[in-house]
């Protein structure tokens, strides 16, 4: 090319193209995927790597647990074939939890990109497999061997020829062979789409390697991340949080962040030891969600690549629940790992109070349903659902929104089309949001039955059923979650349950916590919540100290907004004249 590869204009053009190529890779993955996990929920990550296995760019979507752990995992893949070498048409695969995304259900597929005989880059994706054998996803396994098929780093294809014995082993060991192997093929296909885009890019800009571009992009990301860290006051910041384990006993998580100039060290010393249930977290996954929390809080605009990780060091005691050692069971590692961004943010509250959220549902609710169709053919369906996020300083929390994982729910129409499951109810959960000057996001209520009438199973991988999301600055806690049988008792989280054919399961997802004193909330905002059905008249009066009158028919199913009004005099009496001094207007 006429200009230097590091020319600012050319660099920006190449960088934009790399992002576009990664997005094309992801689009191909979603459009060719077989399972709802890929097509609807997008529980995946896609990225482009340089020949050294360093992540240069990722697609705009993807879960932090996958993308950040894949950033480390690809280096392991390259190291495994350092002596044997790689050739055009090779495709690598593994689901080793300690090398990649922390559980055997997550498969990483990587494809080296060749120009002539040289590797010029790599494309990789990590995706949650609908089934990988062993126990259905739960925390009941006592070691990783019970949790399913564990694939070491190996070649899925060699010089363009598929590893049919490996594929045969996978098919024979999973409950959903067509979906599982179909998704693996989708990963291979999407990598090929990315590879073609990269080859075209290098040819267009007359580049014989991606390394100079990668080095410049990573250097700029590193510098921007260091600048963001340097704005924090030097010092040590801590947070401690109890969480429930699979047997109901509490597990303690503790984090200590040390800011020293433009570097940040995160140490989880003091965290509980690994447990016998499958909620343990490998260090790779701990680093993934920790670095995400730091970046989301301090520098969300910085490109996500190897450079943005360098100023942050994450350590956890070996043998702890955040750095478990084999053969620990790890299937439910998200129930712990998803809590880490919130802990990091709360620890840094004194340094950046304006940016920190109150506590939220955080851990994604994963439910695994199984049984038989009317035809007698078996089915297995993984569903993802979310509670509410915590309140922000100036805005309410987000309702039924998955943070930090970003995974989407499967639409009701899709669930009912491909399984005998019937979704009887899907609504927001009134009263689940923690009150505050800004309130938390609402959880949701979901009721599910089985049309086949035959016995079926449920494994509820759910959290925040004992310890609700914690309020901030006087805000109230969110409501804890629950999973129950209609007309029966609660279902124990993280265990597989066999249900009668006519059973109805009700899931009440946790709400986000509030921030600030509820009596400082604008009465008009309280009125709007009452009209929308988010807050009851009783809670408006007792929690927010806002008197709201309903002037319509008490038996009406539809209550227009005009039938509600604020009793200004009574609200003043409830809140006291001091509110006027705080800038709260009661009209």
Image (spheres, rainbow, N blue to C red):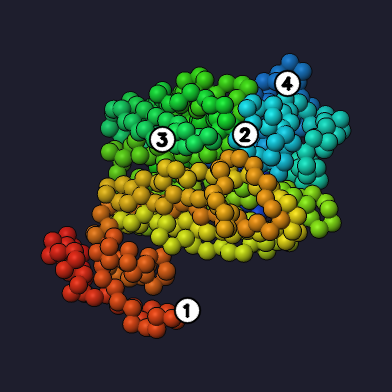
Q: Residue at x 33, y 78 (%)?
A: 550
Instruction: Give the SS element for disc 3.
Output: strand
Residue under pointer 2? 140
In which quadrant will I find the C terminus? bottom left
Instruction: Give the SS element for disc 1.
Output: loop
Vertical relation: 278 (above or below) 497: above
Residue under pointer 1? 557
Q: Is residue 584 left or right of residue 476?
A: left
Q: Which residue, as the protein is rendered here, is positioned at the far top?
A: 83
Q: Are marks 4 and 1 in contact (CB under 8 Å)?
A: no
Label ID, residue 242: 3
Q: Residues within 10 Å of mark 2 (few under 14, many from 20)?
A: many
Question: Mark 3 or mark 2, which is nearer to you?
Answer: 2
Can residue 584 be seen? yes
Residue under pointer 4? 81
Vertical relation: 540 (above or below) 162: below
In the rendered image, which quarter is residue 139 located in? top right
Measure the C-alpha gap from mark 1 to mark 3: 42 Å
Instruction: Give the SS element for disc 2.
Output: loop
Q: Is residue 231 left or right of residue 386?
A: left
Q: Residue at x 74, y 36 (%)?
A: 133
Label ID, residue 215: none
Q: Residue 339 in the image: x percent, y percent? A: 46, 39
């Amino acid at each position: 090319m006429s200009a230097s590869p590091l020319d600012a204009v050319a660099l920006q053009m190449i960088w934009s193209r790399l992002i576009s190529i990664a997005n094309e890779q992801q689009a191909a993955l979603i459009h060719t995927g077989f399972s709802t996990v890929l097509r609807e929920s997008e529980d995946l990550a896609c990225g482009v790597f340089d020949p050294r296995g360093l992540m240069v760019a990722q697609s705009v979507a993807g879960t932090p647990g996958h993308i950040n752990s894949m950033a480390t995992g690809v280096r392991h893949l390259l190291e495994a074939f350092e002596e044997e070498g790689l050739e055009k048409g090779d495709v690598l695969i593994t689901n080793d939890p300690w090398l990649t995304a922390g559980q055997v259900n997550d498969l990483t597929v990587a494809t080296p990109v060749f120009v002539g005989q040289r590797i010029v880059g790599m494309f990789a994706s990590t995706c949650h497999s609908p089934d990988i054998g062993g126990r259905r996803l739960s925390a009941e396994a006592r070691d990783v061997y019970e949790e399913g098929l564990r694939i070491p780093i190996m070649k899925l294809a060699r010089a363009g020829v598929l590893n049919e014995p490996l594929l045969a082993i996978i098919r024979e060991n999973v409950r959903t062979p067509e979906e599982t192997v179909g998704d693996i093929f989708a990963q291979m296909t999407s990598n090929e789409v990315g590879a073609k885009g990269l080859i075209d890019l290098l040819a267009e800009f007359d580049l014989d390697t991606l390394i100079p571009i990668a080095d410049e992009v990573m250097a700029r990301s590193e510098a921007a991340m260091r600048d963001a860290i340097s704005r924090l006051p030097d010092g040590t910041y801590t947070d401690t949080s109890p969480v429930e384990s699979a047997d109901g006993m509490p597990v303690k998580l503790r984090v200590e962040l040390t800011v020293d100039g433009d570097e940040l060290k995160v140490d989880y010393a003091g965290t509980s030891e690994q447990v016998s249930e499958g909620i343990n977290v490998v260090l790779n996954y701990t680093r993934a969600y920790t670095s995400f929390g730091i970046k989301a809080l301090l520098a969300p605009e910085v490109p996500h690549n190897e450079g943005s990780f360098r100023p942050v060091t994450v350590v956890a005691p070996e043998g702890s629940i955040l750095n478990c050692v084999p053969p620990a069971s790890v299937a439910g590692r998200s129930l712990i790992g998803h809590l880490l961004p919130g802990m990091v943010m709360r620890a840094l509250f004194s340094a950046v109070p304006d940016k920190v959220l109150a506590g939220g549902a955080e851990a994604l609710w994963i439910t695994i349903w199984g049984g038989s169709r009317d035809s007698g053919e078996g089915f297995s369906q993984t569903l993802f659902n979310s509670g509410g996020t915590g309140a922000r300083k100036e805005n309410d929390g987000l309702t039924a929104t998955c943070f930090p994982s970003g995974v989407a729910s499967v639409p009701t129409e899709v669930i009912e089309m491909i399984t005998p499951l019937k979704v009887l109810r899907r609504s927001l959960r009134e009263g689940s949001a923690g009150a505050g000057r800004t309130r938390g996001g609402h959880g949701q209520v979901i009721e599910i039955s089985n049309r086949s009438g035959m016995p079926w199973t449920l494994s509820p991988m759910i959290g925040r059923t004992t310890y609700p999301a914690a309020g901030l600055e006087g805000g109230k806690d969110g409501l804890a979650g629950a999973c129950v049988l209609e007309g029966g008792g609660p279902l124990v989280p993280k265990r597989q349950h066999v249900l009668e054919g006519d059973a109805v399961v009700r899931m009440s997802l946790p709400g986000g916590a509030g921030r600030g004193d509820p009596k400082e909330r604008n009465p008009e905002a309280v009125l709007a919540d009452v009209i929308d059905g988010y807050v009851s008249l009783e809670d408006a009066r007792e929690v927010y100290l806002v008197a709201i009158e309903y002037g319509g028919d008490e038996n009406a199913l539809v209550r227009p907004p005009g039938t509600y009004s604020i009793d200004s005099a009574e609200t003043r009496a409830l809140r006291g004249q001091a509110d006027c001094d705080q800038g709260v207007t009661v009209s």
